[in-house]
């Protein structure tokens, strides 16, 4: 009975014209073609849908970040969650350039603002750009974050961050970071190296009339370029283990009310034996601990306070010639010593200075002697607080010491 019905249906179709076995194969072929066509249609619809969503998301992120954003949309997960690859943000002249191998954008949901998370990339920052007032693009970015909740949180993971300052470069590797719109209406962020033992961190602030970035930790070997215009190239080159923090900003108020754009609060080490002989100061040995506060306009001579002491538990030596030269440098008068060739040991080195681009002042720490003191003996060099020396005169005396050294060592 069943066979008869099958035969009847077959005769009513076009398939009765061909043998039964061939008809079955053809039927499966028709089904396969239909499935393939269905898959192609679904793929086409999905591709068109992804293309439309990528176009819309590109426009949204470019608008919120106020910079061209390019990426490939690889997956749409739960509603409002997108997986991205080959992300590029910025890169135009004067902008930071950020690249990421992958990322995720999560649209606002359940009272949470939109968030962009990027992974495995590089970010290049020129610190000098942070000394300028926020430009129109950054102000628009700030306004977009305040007015829209599409993107108010931005995170980085496994990033390499390159900081540029003139010809100097500082590279932070394996970084994690986060930036948010703060309750006060400004954008605050922080980046840190995730490697064990690393102490370097970077924090930044963007407000209506102020932007600033601070690098903290150590060592900061690239600080030499910042310090050279203020403390002099030879001395800056001799400072090692420079730890602390360095800030560049649109403006930094000081006690004098000057609107500076850079400052540093550092501790460093100075090996007296590394001072270049051509300075003409003479032979000295001993390791000093130096505390420096420097502020001013980036790339120009600024102001600083310095306090130098002999490292704890150490001693130093100074030649008679060096004592005379140091005395001449500070007072303009030559010091009388009984021997030209004698070398003196000292267990105390304590000098405090305040310098501006125009003057140098000698100061003192409360309750502490200032100068170079020999063990159990009279002071080898006394530094009186309150002395004022024009910087021009100090440089003239240094030039004179250098000239005498060259004459004594010229062939």
Image (spheres, rainbow, N blue to C red):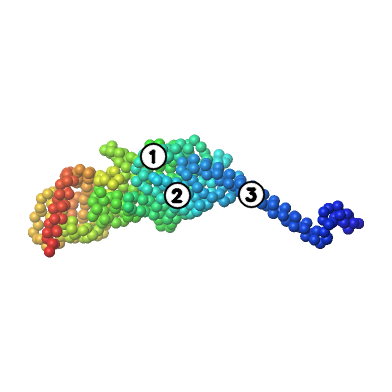
**Sequence-first tag of 3 and 1:** 3
Which of the two discs, 2 and 3, labels the residue nearer the N terminus? 3
Residues at discs 3 and 1 in contact (Cβ within 8 Å): no
- Residue 314 at x, y percent in the picture: 24, 60
Give neighbour class at mark 3: few <14, some 14-19, many 20+ (Cα, 10 Å): few
Q: Earlier in the sequence, mark 2 or mark 1?
A: 2
Residue 347 appears in which quarter of the rendering? Answer: bottom left
Provide the secondary structure element on which disc 2 rests.
strand
Residue at which label 1 appears: 134
10 Å neighbourhood of mark 2: few (<14), some, or many (≥20)? many
Which quarter of the rendering shows the N terminus? Answer: bottom right
Left or right: residue 23 compared with residue 333: right
Residue topped by disc 2: 98
Which residue position holds label 3?
44
Residue 269 pos. (x, y %): 28, 56
- Name which residue lies at 69% across and 54% down: 36
Q: CA distance from mark 2 to mark 1?
A: 19 Å
Left or right position of 143 against 243: right
Measured in 3D between alpha carbons, the distance from the residue under mark 2 to the one under mark 3, in whole angstroms, is 32 Å
Residue 293 lies, with reference to residue 273, above or below; the image says above
- 384 vs 313: above or below: above
Q: Is residue 101 left or right of residue 171?
A: right
Q: Is residue 146 visible?
A: yes
């Amino acid at each position: 009975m069943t066979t008869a019905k099958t035969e009847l249906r077959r005769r009513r179709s076009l398939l009765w014209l061909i043998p039964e076995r061939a008809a079955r194969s053809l039927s499966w072929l028709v089904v396969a073609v239909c499935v393939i066509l269905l898959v192609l249609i679904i793929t086409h619809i999905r591709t068109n849908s992804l293309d439309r969503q990528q176009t819309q998301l590109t426009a949204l992120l470019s608008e919120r970040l106020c910079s061209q954003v390019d990426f490939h949309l690889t997956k749409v997960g739960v509603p409002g969650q997108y997986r991205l690859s080959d992300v590029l943000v910025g890169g135009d002249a004067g902008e930071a350039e950020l690249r990421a191998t992958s990322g995720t954008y999560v649209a606002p949901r359940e009272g949470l603002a939109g968030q962009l998370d990027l992974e495995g990339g590089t970010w290049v920052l020129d610190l000098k750009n942070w000394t300028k007032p926020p430009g129109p693009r950054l102000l628009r970015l700030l306004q977009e974050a305040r007015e829209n909740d599409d993107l108010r949180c931005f995170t980085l993971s496994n990033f390499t961050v390159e900081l540029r300052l003139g010809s100097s470069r500082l590279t932070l590797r394996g970084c994690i970071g986060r930036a948010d719109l703060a309750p006060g209406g400004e954008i605050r962020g922080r980046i840190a190296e995730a490697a064990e033992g690393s102490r370097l961190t970077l924090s930044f602030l963007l407000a209506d009339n102020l932007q600033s970035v601070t690098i903290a930790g150590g060592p900061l070997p690239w600080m030499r370029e910042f310090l050279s215009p203020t403390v002099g190239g030879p001395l800056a080159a001799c400072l090692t283990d420079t730890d602390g923090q360095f800030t560049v900003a649109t403006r930094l108020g000081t006690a004098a009310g000057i609107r500076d754009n850079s400052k540093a609060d550092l501790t460093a080490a100075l090996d007296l034996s590394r001072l270049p002989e051509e300075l003409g100061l003479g032979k000295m040995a001993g390791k000093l601990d130096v505390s420096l506060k420097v502020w001013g306009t980036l790339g120009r001579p600024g102001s600083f306070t310095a306090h130098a002491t002999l490292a704890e538990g150490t001693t130093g030596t100074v030649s008679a010639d060096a004592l005379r030269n140091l005395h001449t440098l500070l007072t303009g008068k030559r010091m009388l010593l009984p021997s030209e060739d004698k070398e003196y040991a000292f267990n105390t080195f304590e000098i405090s200075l305040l310098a501006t681009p125009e003057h140098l002042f000698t100061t003192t720490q409360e309750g502490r002697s200032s100068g170079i003191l020999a063990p159990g003996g009279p002071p080898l060099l006394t530094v009186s607080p309150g002395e004022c020396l024009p910087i021009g005169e100090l440089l003239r005396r240094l030039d004179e010491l250098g000239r005498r050294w060259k004459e004594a060592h010229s062939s």
